[in-house]
Amino acid sequence: MRLLSILGLLTALVGPAAAAEVPLSERVTLAHGSYDIGGGMTVAAELRRTARGGTALCGVWAESAALAAVTMGEARQSLSLATVYVDGRRIAQDLGFMPKVAPRLDYAGAPARCRAVDLPWRAGLVPEVFLPRRTIQPGNRDTLGNRVVFRQTGTGAMSGALEVIPLLRRQIGTVPLSPLATVVDGRYSSGGGLRLAAEIVAVNGEAALCGAWSDLPGQLAQTEPLGRAVLAAAAVTLGRQRLDVDPGAFRRVRARGDYTGATANCLATGLRWTPEVGRARLGIALPSLVVYRNTTPRGAQVIRFAPRG
């Protein structure tokens, strides 16, 4: 009985800090931090009312899929030094309790963990997360002796340190696109968009999907790094068969009206080339989805991507 009493007391003291994961709502607030050599991290957080009428801070964090060697592991240090304010009052520091998730377009629904904070509950409260400026001094040849600086700026986890051309899955060469390439595009609700041109080509007896894509002018900073993630959610079909390919792995080229002659890289489809395959209709369905959502004390912003036509 004495042991049970002690355990009960500990549970009461810990409270929501040990709560199970809960999905973030659409009222997430984002904080982005970036390294000056590329890549970064994002913290997504919100405040929730506890069962006892108090306030809990809930959130997740993510870091870029591509990072320079010198910045790997630094995001957790920044997370431990982060602070959270509400109406100018600091309510939390050290966000290490938040779980790490993969970078995503929309953090609503992300599996967050919560911690109780000393703040009376009031509807409409918005947390502001601050990531401290840090100077990283690696002392090795990766940065040629230069310092690497982390600041709360940029697009955070959606930016990459190795953006030139990612390692392409199942790439099997490059070809100039023909006039018969299928061209599709979509727009962000905030302006700008992207355009993809692709076609099925015979490469060494195999049916390869070859393509290239472009960002379209007029984008905000929030959407500039999102093209590959949006394309990764596209569905590609050949006739009635869906192809197991990632259009986000295609080369990015400058925007143009006619993609004839544009250098495209080719991805394996797993299909042998036959005349029937060559005559099959290529379908590319760009996704319709929320790509950015953020709530701040100054208001909420939601950016959507939708295919055109």
Image (tube, rainbow, N blue to C red):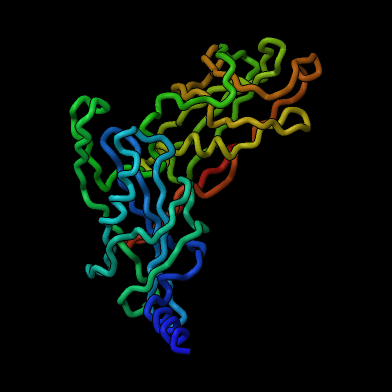
Which residue of the protein is positioned furthest toward the front in this rendering?
2
Q: Relative to residue 235, is residue 134 depicted above or below?
A: below
Q: Choose top left, top right, bottom left or bottom right for residue 209.
A: top right
Q: Relative to residue 42, is residue 309 depicted above or below?
A: above
Give me the residue at 25% from left, 56% from top: 81
* Left or right of 119, for residue 170: right
Which residue of the protein is positioned furthest toward the right in this rendering?
276
Q: Relative to residue 41, is residue 235 depicted above or below?
A: above
Residue 115 drawn at (x, y percent):
39, 69
Picture quarter with the C terminus: top right
Residue 164 drawn at (x, y percent):
40, 25
Residue 279 drawn at (x, y percent):
77, 18
Which residue of the protein is positioned furthest toward the top in this rendering?
204
Q: Nearer the viewer, residue 241 or 144?
A: 144
Please give the count of numbered marks on the rendered protein: 0
Give me the residue at 30% from left, 42% from top: 34
Give me the residue at 47% from left, 70% from top: 19
* Left or right of 267, for residue 304: left
Q: Nearer the viewer, residue 264 or 306?
A: 264
Give me the residue at 72% from left, 11% from top: 205
Q: Choose top left, top right, bottom left or bottom right for residue 223.
A: top left
Residue 291 drawn at (x, y percent):
49, 47
* Left or right of 23, for residue 209: right
Q: Nearer the viewer, residue 119 or 123?
A: 119
